Amino acid sequence: MAPNGLEARGSQGAGIASGALSLGSGIQSFRRWFLVQTKPAAEKSALTHLERQGYHVYHPRLLQTSLRRGRWIDRIVPLFPRYLFVQLDIVRQSLGPIRSTVGVSGLVRFGSDATVVPDGVVDALMRKADPESGLHRLSERQPLQRGTRVSILAGVFEGLEGIFEREGGAERAVILLDLLGRHTQVCVRSAFLAPSPA
């Protein structure tokens, strides 16, 4: 199954038979993007071996922030796990070697033809990435508003819910907890808080 928004469609599924793309002024491009599925956790290996064979590969990656042992850490993970975009000149290069490349599981197909990914899809992904690092980022965490119901993810009060009251200094927040039937102000690390599901 292809990544969200990249499902095969009939108009894209013509594979190599789709012919040349006109660039205006009589110039034609025979370069096409294809979607390659890798083996589990083998994106880097597949990318390296594909590039060694002269293919142009785009591997969108995400800078992901997660809480571990009470600390927020950044990790770089694939934006689409197990998928790479491979561009080749369909006149001069063959899809054949891709299938037997180390780390590759196969080409995403529509029927019997390899699916052609529109240039606009890949271009849009590249534009959304950070221009310096090339990484994609999720939306920044929004500041909590007074009265927001929050969950405590770590620390002494882990698992409890309370009401956000105010910022309490450097990387701290004051929240109201219902302890023994009464609201009590407690100070916790801001990094331990997340808005409670509605």
Image: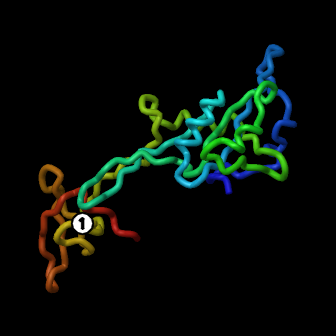
Quadrant assignment, res 88 = top right
Q: Residue 19: x, y in percent?
A: 85, 31
Quadrant assignment, res 55 = top right
Task: Tell me if residue 123 can be seen.
Answer: no
Instruction: Report the side of 130 relative to 92 (left or right).
Output: left
Q: Nearer the viewer, residue 112 or 163?
A: 112
Image quadrant in which the C terminus is located: bottom left
Q: Residue furthest bottom?
A: 181
Q: Nearer the viewer, residue 38 or 119?
A: 38
Tell me the residue at 54%/42% (across/down): 45
Task: Tell me if residue 185 can be seen.
Answer: yes
Above or below residue 81? Residue 135 is above
Q: Nearer the viewer, residue 155 or 78?
A: 78
Q: Residue 125: x, y in percent?
A: 57, 39
Q: Residue furthest top?
A: 25
Q: Residue 6: x, y in percent?
A: 67, 49
Q: Residue 114: x, y in percent?
A: 78, 44
Which amino acid, mark 1?
Ala
Label 1: which secondary element: loop
Instruction: Report the side of 10 relative to 36 (left or right).
Output: right
Categorize mark 1 by other alpha carbons within 10 Å: few (<14), some (14-19), many (20+): some
Tell me the residue at 18%/74% (across/down): 177
Image quadrant in which the N terminus is located: bottom right
Q: How many numbered marks appear?
A: 1
The residue to which callout 1 is attached is 154
